Image (cartoon, grey):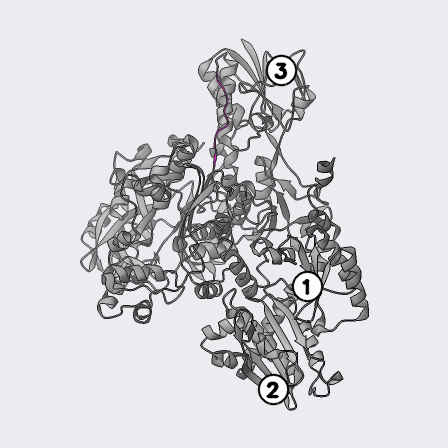
């Protein structure tokens, strides 16, 4: 009998032995080493064992009887010390054994982030039964666990420990969970499902240090200083091929033990398979390709010809009640198109990615019934051009007429629920229509359908259309963009009503038709979210226009303009010297603006962080001349200098600017304070203008002096500076909270039906005014910071430098 | 592997299982498994319940699972027959498809000084699952622990079922794998737990758990079938997603899961009718004598079927 030694009794080698005993029974005398003190078990089912939904006995693939029946000499719990390929001998801790053929299937090792404190007791990986049992041992009601890593393993560990009664926090470095398998929309749904299980999920969270007490883990500290107390810390951040034995034996090793398509290593008598190998630069972590390798290795050992070809793999998360499916490639690309289906009420998201006429990726959440069908189309690279229109509806819809949403509504039975919030069925709506409610508003008033979250408004309109035929004229509220049916107003209202606090949450719950929105809706959503949820939402620079992203105005030649803030239009000789020095140093053109500031034009992008640093050093901050936010507060010289001045207009302007700067608004916001009705500061054509008079201050709003010319309308007349400041802040906050993105205040005022409602909110209702001010101040506590100072660091300077300077090489 | 068949005890925690279905304005017996309790079976066949009447009528009217212990003669119509049969407690689980009552499953238990097991009903109050009622047989300490336990979403068998909206099967409740009440569960000899959502009109959350002990098991085989269109597509039917059997070992298969087609076999009958099936006889899987299959709806559709075998 030929002698076969196998190192590692995992799933890959186990499957290989099954094939080998099938094709070549009795030909091999097998010795099987395993560092774990047991044989082969279904490692991917450890998560249900952790959660208590399976017992370990159930997931044992090969028990002692199986090994005995096939004459396998088991050396379990014994590590292999060395391999001598010249003598064809493997040495274990208890002695050596000779081989004719050797199979290395040592699997992988969990990657441990080199954080301070990683050696503390209670810091573990999640890899084998021992790790699982340690988690089970640690589980007690009220005990706390932190899992670093929001991938498959990390989330399964988190859900399992939660079922065991622990308080669990998942810390994930990336912006959404399972980012390798899911896009942000599906990641959002998954996060929601986990949060619903009582698991805390922190994304974009960077672990900094593991804190201990008496040698045992006490907490995880993040780089923002947050401390997460824990009794157990599980690192599930990835795996690395366990290739050390192969390397020591002199085999060719890259990231893993390098093998050919027959699973042979650089030594033809040594095969390798599983997670320890590297094949054509690829590593393997999911089970399907491992089983393919097992079949090929068995064939190679039997002298048959077989070749390993990596194949597409699909992903399944073993958390009961979370249905997700992911396969193929779903990164965005210029030649790629998306088909997206969302059903907010059922929590369903489906996205197909097409390139040419082929399906190349699929992400499904909530409804995974067609996952395998899509997977087949991806694997076979099927031409899907013929079924493209109905592809997203799955195989059941192929071969028939394209799905007509109206036909589907017509086919709904009378007891089909249309409005989930208020439990209104189709029959009730049809009855209401027949009784004279022929508009959406009338249906809302009579049946309450679509009167709560409003998500079913489209469906109600379809019922109206089906029932009334051409007698129904659908209202023509303009949607935000092609990604959604909702107009801006509805989106703003629903973000608040449904407490939607992230971009994926908005897109999923409001049924966005595209996976990630577009250049039109993303900036608007980013603004709405940061305005409504200043504490919870994190500004997304990628959803901003280029000027806001770069904190400078791009000019027609690709250079930028830089404008420091001059509080109330006042400056000092030192500031002017610093501006002059910067202008000279960076070869800028200097322009005095209409907003009483100095603009430095012609600055190269790579010089921006440097000029910011220089101006910062002179005590100046960004003038936000590029932002949808507070721009400038123009003032006249007021009582300090002017013979006609009635109040300290300059001082008030400075106070207003210092209070308001840094705030993001739906569109740019300009102020002026003028010292007398002669109006030298041109306060009557600003978004908000204050005119000082002998008896106090007149506040006007809604002026414009751009494409449209408009005089301000009087909002209030008050006696004190404090009242001016309070009303101004409250007005700005109300504008921030209720205007559509890119509506200047005058447009917003017109849409609210005139100043009456606004005056009631910010002037008459003192309690409401105070609430608006408090919300503004809360937002300012996050957003009132100088973007220049944040970016004038060496890291930013490096990041903004060109990748290479090719001009010299070209000259040479 | 589980114990083999020859080690099985003949006793079980549940003595009688019966299905009551609406007929006009009353509930009538559709089918039942009574073992040797022929007299009780005869009484039951001659009985029907109005809305709010008796145990099944109460589960219907109050739209919630109901536990009867000690058989109050006013509300338990079959008290005498039950006492003669040695039955001491009963649990009724209403089966609602949306707002419509499809059936009421009633299980009756006896010999509470010697039999161990638990049938519990958990209800949501203030964001936590609290014990609504339960029958524990001889597991008195475990009963006390349960009365003083609550489950947040996602924790333990009831909290897990609540969060996942899915039946769940826990193994080894009381040994190495720590059920939240494990110490007491272990002392009571409880091993396997089946948790299931009990959907009712109005949206109140109820979770029922069947906790089985080796000596007097609720069942020797448990199955959970997934019948959701979101999982199976338009083809319908159901797929076995979890299961454990004392005779056949694990019933789940990641690679090749069992399928059931509508109207075919007892699971198929449940899928087709939306009504629980109680079946006795020679044709039951793995040679068991009785099986109960219970549909669990989500809205008006069947989402899952759970089955247990004795």
Q: Which residue does the numbered mark 2 point to in the structure image?
A: A718
Same chain for mark 2 and mark 1? The answer is: yes
User: What is the secondary structure assignment of the residue under circle 2?
Assistant: strand
Of marks 3 and 1, which one's residue comes earlier in the chain? Answer: 3
Please, which chain is the residue tagged with disc 3 on? A
Is A439 on the left-hand or right-hand side of A368?
left
Residue A327, given in percent of the width and then of the height, sits at 46, 38
User: What is the secondary structure assignment of the residue under circle 1?
Assistant: loop
| Residue A785, disc | 1
Of marks 2 and 3, which one's residue comes earlier in the chain? Answer: 3
Q: In which quarter of the image is residue B121?
A: bottom left
Marks 2 and 3, how far apart at CA: 90 Å
Task: Report if residue A213 lies within the magenta region.
Answer: no
Q: In this view, does B190 lie above or below A690?
A: above
Q: Mark 2–mark 3 contact, CB under 8 Å?
A: no
Q: Mark 2–mark 1 contact, CB under 8 Å?
A: no
Classify mark 1: residues with Cα within 10 Å, few (<14), some (14-19) or many (20+).
some
| Residue A267, disc | 3
Please, which chain is the residue tagged with disc 2 on? A
Residue B135 visible (yes or no): no
Marks 2 and 1, how far apart at CA: 30 Å
Residue A313, given in percent of the width and then of the height, sits at 48, 33
Task: Report if residue A311 lies within the magenta region.
Answer: yes
Q: Quadrant of residue A582?
A: bottom right
Of marks 2 and 1, which one's residue comes earlier in the chain? Answer: 2
Residue A451, given in percent of the width and then of the height, sits at 37, 67
Tell me which segment is drawn in magenta: A306-315
Image depth: mark 2 or mark 1 in front:
2
């Amino acid at each position: 009998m030929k002698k076969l030694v196998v190192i590692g009794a995992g799933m890959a080698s186990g499957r290989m032995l099954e094939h080998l005993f099938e094709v070549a029974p009795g030909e091999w005398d097998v010795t099987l080493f395993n560092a774990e003190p047991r044989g082969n078990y279904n490692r991917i089912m450890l998560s249900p064992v952790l959660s208590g939904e399976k017992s370990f006995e159930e997931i044992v693939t090969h028990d002692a009887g199986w090994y005995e029946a096939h004459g396998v000499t088991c050396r379990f719990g014994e590590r292999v010390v060395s391999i001598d390929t010249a003598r064809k001998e493997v040495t274990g801790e208890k002695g050596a054994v000779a081989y004719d053929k050797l199979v290395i299937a040592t699997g992988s090792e969990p990657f441990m982030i080199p954080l301070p404190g990683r050696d503390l007791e209670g810091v573990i990986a999640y890899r084998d039964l021992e790790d699982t049992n340690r988690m089970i041992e640690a589980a007690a009601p009220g005990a706390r666990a932190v899992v670093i890593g929001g991938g498959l393993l990390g989330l399964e560990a988190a859900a399992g420990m939660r079922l065991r009664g622990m308080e669990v926090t998942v810390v994930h470095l990336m912006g959404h969970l399972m980012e390798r398998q899911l896009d942000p929309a599906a990641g959002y749904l998954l996060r929601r499902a986990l949060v619903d299980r009582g698991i805390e999920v922190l994304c974009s969270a960077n672990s900094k240090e593991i804190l201990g007490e008496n040698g045992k883990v006490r907490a995880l500290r993040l780089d923002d200083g947050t401390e997460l107390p824990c009794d157990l810390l599980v690192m599930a951040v990835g795996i690395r091929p366990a290739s050390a034995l192969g390397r020591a034996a002199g085999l060719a090793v890259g990231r893993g033990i390098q093998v050919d398509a027959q699973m042979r290593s650089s030594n033809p008598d040594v095969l390798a398979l599983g997670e320890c190998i590297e094949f054509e630069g690829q590593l393997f972590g999911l089970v399907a390709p491992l089983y393919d390798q097992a079949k090929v290795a068995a064939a190679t050992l039997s002298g048959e010809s077989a070749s390993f070809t990596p194949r597409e793999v699909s992903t399944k998360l073993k958390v009961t009640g979370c249905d997700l499916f992911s396969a193929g490639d779903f990164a965005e690309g210029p030649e790629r198109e998306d088909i997206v289906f969302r059903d907010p009420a059922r929590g369903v998201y489906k996205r197909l990615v097409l390139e040419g006429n082929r399906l190349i990726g699929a992400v499904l959440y909530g409804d995974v019934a067609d996952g395998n069908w899509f997977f087949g189309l991806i694997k076979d690279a099927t031409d899907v051009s013929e079924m493209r229109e109905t592809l997203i509806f799955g195989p059941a819809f192929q071969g028939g007429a394209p799905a007509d949403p109206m036909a589907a509504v017509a086919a709904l039975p009378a007891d089909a629920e249309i409005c989930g919030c208020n439990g209104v069925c189709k029959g009730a709506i049809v009855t209401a229509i027949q009784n004279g409610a022929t508009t959406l508003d009338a249906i809302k008033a009579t049946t309450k359908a679509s009167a709560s979250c409003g998500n079913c408004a489209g469906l109600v309109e379809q019922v109206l259309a089906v029932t009334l035929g051409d007698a129904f004229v659908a209202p023509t509220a303009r949607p935000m963009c092609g990604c959604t049916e909702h107009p801006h107003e509805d989106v703003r209202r629903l973000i608040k009503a449904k407490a939607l606090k992230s971009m994926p949450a908005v897109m999923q719950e409001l049924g966005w038709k595209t996976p990630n929105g577009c250049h039109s809706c993303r900036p608007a959503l980013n603004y709405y979210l940061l305005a409504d949820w200043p504490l919870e939402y994190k500004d997304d620079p990628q959803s901003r226009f280029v000027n806001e992203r770069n904190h400078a105005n791009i000019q027609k030649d690709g250079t930028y303009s830089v404008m420091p803030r001059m509080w109330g239009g006042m400056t000092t000789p030192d500031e002017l010297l610093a501006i002059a020095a910067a202008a000279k140093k960076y070869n800028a053109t200097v322009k005095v603006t209409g907003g009483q500031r100095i603009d430095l034009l012609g600055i190269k992008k790579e010089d921006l962080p440097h000029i910011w640093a220089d101006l910062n050093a002179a005590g100046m901050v960004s003038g936000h001349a590029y932002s949808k936010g507070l721009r400038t507060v123009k003032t006249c010289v007021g009582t300090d200098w002017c013979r006609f001045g009635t109040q300290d207009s300059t001082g008030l302007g400075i106070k207003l600017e210092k209070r308001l700067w840094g705030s993001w608004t739906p569109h740019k916001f300009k102020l002026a304070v003028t010292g007398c009705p002669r109006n030298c500061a041109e306060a009557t054509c600003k978004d908000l203008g204050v005119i000082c008079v002998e008896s106090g201050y007149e506040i006007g709003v809604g002026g414009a002096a751009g494409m449209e010319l408009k005089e301000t309308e009087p909002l209030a007349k008050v006696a004190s500076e404090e009242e001016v400041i309070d009303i101004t802040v409250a007005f700005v906050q109300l504008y921030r909270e209720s205007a559509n993105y890119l509506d200047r205040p005058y447009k917003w005022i017109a849409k609210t039906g005139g100043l009456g409602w606004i005056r009631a909110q910010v002037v008459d209702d003192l309690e409401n005014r105070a609430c608006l001010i408090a919300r503004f101040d809360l937002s300012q506590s996050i957003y009132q910071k100088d973007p220049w100072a944040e970016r004038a660091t060496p890291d930013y300077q490096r990041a903004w430098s060109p990748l290479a300077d090719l001009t010299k090489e070209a000259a040479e | 592997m589980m114990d083999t068949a020859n080690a099985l005890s003949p006793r079980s925690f549940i003595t009688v299982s019966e299905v009551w279905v609406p007929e006009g304005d009353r509930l009538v017996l559709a089918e039942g498994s009574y073992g040797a309790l022929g007299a009780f079976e005869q009484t039951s066949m001659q009985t029907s319940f109005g809305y709010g009447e008796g145990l099944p009528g109460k589960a219907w009217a109050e739209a919630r699972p109901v536990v009867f212990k000690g058989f109050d003669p006013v509300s338990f119509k079959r008290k005498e027959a039950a006492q003669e049969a040695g039955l001491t407690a009963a649990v009724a689980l209403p089966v609602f498809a949306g707002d419509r009552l499809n059936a009421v499953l009633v299980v009756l238990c006896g010999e509470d000084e010697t039999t161990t097991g638990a049938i519990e009903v958990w209800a949501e109050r203030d964001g936590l699952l609290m014990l609504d009622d339960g029958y524990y047989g001889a597991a008195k300490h475990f009963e006390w622990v349960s009365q003083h336990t609550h489950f947040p979403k996602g924790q333990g068998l009831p909290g897990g079922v609540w969060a996942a909206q899915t039946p769940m099967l826990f193994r080894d409740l009381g040994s190495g794998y720590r059920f939240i009440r494990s110490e007491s569960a272990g002392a009571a000899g409880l091993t396997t737990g089946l948790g299931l959502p009990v959907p009712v009109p109005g949206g109140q959350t109820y979770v029922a758990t069947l906790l089985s002990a080796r000596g007097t098991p609720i069942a020797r085989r448990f199955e959970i079938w997934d019948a959701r269109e979101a999982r199976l597509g338009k083809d319908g039917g159901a797929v076995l997603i979890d299961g454990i059997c004392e005779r056949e070992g694990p019933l789940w298969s990641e690679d090749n899961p069992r399928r059931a087609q509508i109207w075919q076999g007892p699971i198929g009958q449940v899928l087709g009718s939306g009504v629980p099936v109680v079946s006795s006889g020679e044709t039951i899987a793995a040679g068991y004598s009785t099986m109960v299959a219970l549909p669990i709806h989500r809205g008006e559709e069947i989402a899952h079927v759970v089955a247990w075998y004795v």
